[in-house]
Image: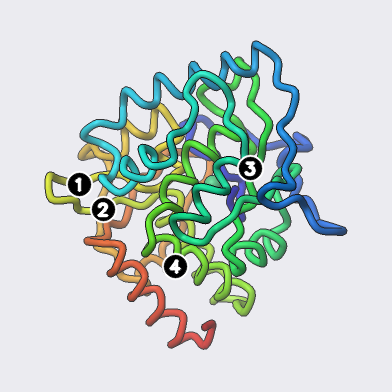
């Protein structure tokens, strides 16, 4: 899940058009959290799409995904063969960082989404994209949300930062709101980090995309140091692969710098 259309990484000018999956949902009541989440009746085809996505993306991670992402993925012990149960993932997240999953029916209204993050709850989809959408889907599905987002929430510093993004977003208006949305975009979805063995990906918009995972670390992409003021001033285009990305040195830096920026803007 993301506050914007969350799988924007195909390098094609696809329009969300009237796809109902792209219309944010305004909640009218609570959604199931943790052990309240029922496991859906997936078809064999849906499990197979999950298996295909998982295996081909996993092959790309070595030397590209951040050490912290791979540690989180390993610790979560996600089922590669069958779509995992959100309730089970939620229990593992709670043990590691105190986060929980909630089952969302689709792309949430931004306020509803951030309101959950502020309480250390990640709204997660549980449906699987169609086989025709292996490379691109205009709205979140559970591969994007589970494979891409939950491993980073296992990291204590990232988990703190993610909650602060939610808390700050609830207070942001006007230019601050736009700045915060850009910071979300260039970190949670499209962030890079300097690991000891080189530059790596931690952003899920990249990690859950086959094409962008390969593109993002090439010289075609300008890499800039993570300075919140610069990130907040950087526009982005959700319909094409990102040509400018921001690189953090550590998740401590990410949390501390975001904290500073938010306090200076009276958002925390
Ligand atoms: Fe996302």
- C-alpha span from label 2 to label 3: 30 Å
First in sequence, mark 3 or 4: give its number: 3
Q: Mark 2 points at which residue?
A: 193
Q: Which of these two is toward me, 190 or 255?
A: 255
Residue 101 percent coordinates (x, y): 61, 50
Neighbourhood count class around disc 3 (C-alpha, 10 Å): few under 14, some 14–19, many 20 upward? many
* Residue 76: percent from left, percent from top: 44, 40
At numbered mark 2, what does the secondary structure look like: helix, strand or loop? strand
Residue at left offset 35%, top offset 47%? 202
Residue 160, numbered circle:
4
Q: Which of marks 1 and 4 is nearer the N terminus?
A: 4
Q: Distance between the residues labelled 1 and 3?
A: 33 Å
State left or right for residue 268 relative to residue 190.
right
Task: State which tag comes first along the sequence, 1 or 3.
Answer: 3
Residues at marks 2 and 3 touching, judged by CB atoms closer than 8 Å: no
First of labels 1, 2 by sequence position: 2
In the drawing, what numbered circle is on residue 199? Answer: 1
Q: How crowded is mark 4: few (under 14 residues within 10 Å), some or many (20 or more)?
A: many
Viewed as shown, does residue 138 lie left or right of 212? Answer: right
Where in the figure is residue 64, as x and y percent of width and height? 26, 36
Decide if residue 147 is on the left or right side of residue 142: left
Q: Do callouts 2 and 4 mark residues in contact (Cβ within 8 Å)? A: no
Q: Do the residues labelled 1 and 2 touch (CB within 8 Å)?
A: yes
Which residue is at a point 76% across and 42% down the rendered structure image? Answer: 105
């Amino acid at each position: 899940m993301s506050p914007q259309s969350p799988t924007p990484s195909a390098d094609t000018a696809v329009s969300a058009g009237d796809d109902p999956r792209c219309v944010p949902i305004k909640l009218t009541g609570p959604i199931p959290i943790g052990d309240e989440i029922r496991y859906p009746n997936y078809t064999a085809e849906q499990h197979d799409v999950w298996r295909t996505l998982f295996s081909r993306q996993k092959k790309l991670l070595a030397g590209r995904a951040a050490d912290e992402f791979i540690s989180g993925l390993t610790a979560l012990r996600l089922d590669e063969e069958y779509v995992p149960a959100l309730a089970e993932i939620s229990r593992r997240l709670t043990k590691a960082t105190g986060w929980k999953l909630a089952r969302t029916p689709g792309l949430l209204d931004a306020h509803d989404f951030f309101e959950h993050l502020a309480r250390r709850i990640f709204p997660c989809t549980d449906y699987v994209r169609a086989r025709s959408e292996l490379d691109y889907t205009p709205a979140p599905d559970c591969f994007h949300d589970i494979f891409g987002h939950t491993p980073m929430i296992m990291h204590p510093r990232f988990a703190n930062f993610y909650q602060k993004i939610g808390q700050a977003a609830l207070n942001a208006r006007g230019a601050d709101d736009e700045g915060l949305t850009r910071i979300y975009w260039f970190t949670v979805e499209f962030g890079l980090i300097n690991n000891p063995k080189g530059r790596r990906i931690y952003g899920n918009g990249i990690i859950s995309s086959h094409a962008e995972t390969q593109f993002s670390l090439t010289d075609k992409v300008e890499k800039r140091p993570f300075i919140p003021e610069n990130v907040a001033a950087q526009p982005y285009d959700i319909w094409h692969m990102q040509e400018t990305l921001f690189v953090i040195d550590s998740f401590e830096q990410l949390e501390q710098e975001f904290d500073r920026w938010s306090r200076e803007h009276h958002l925390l």
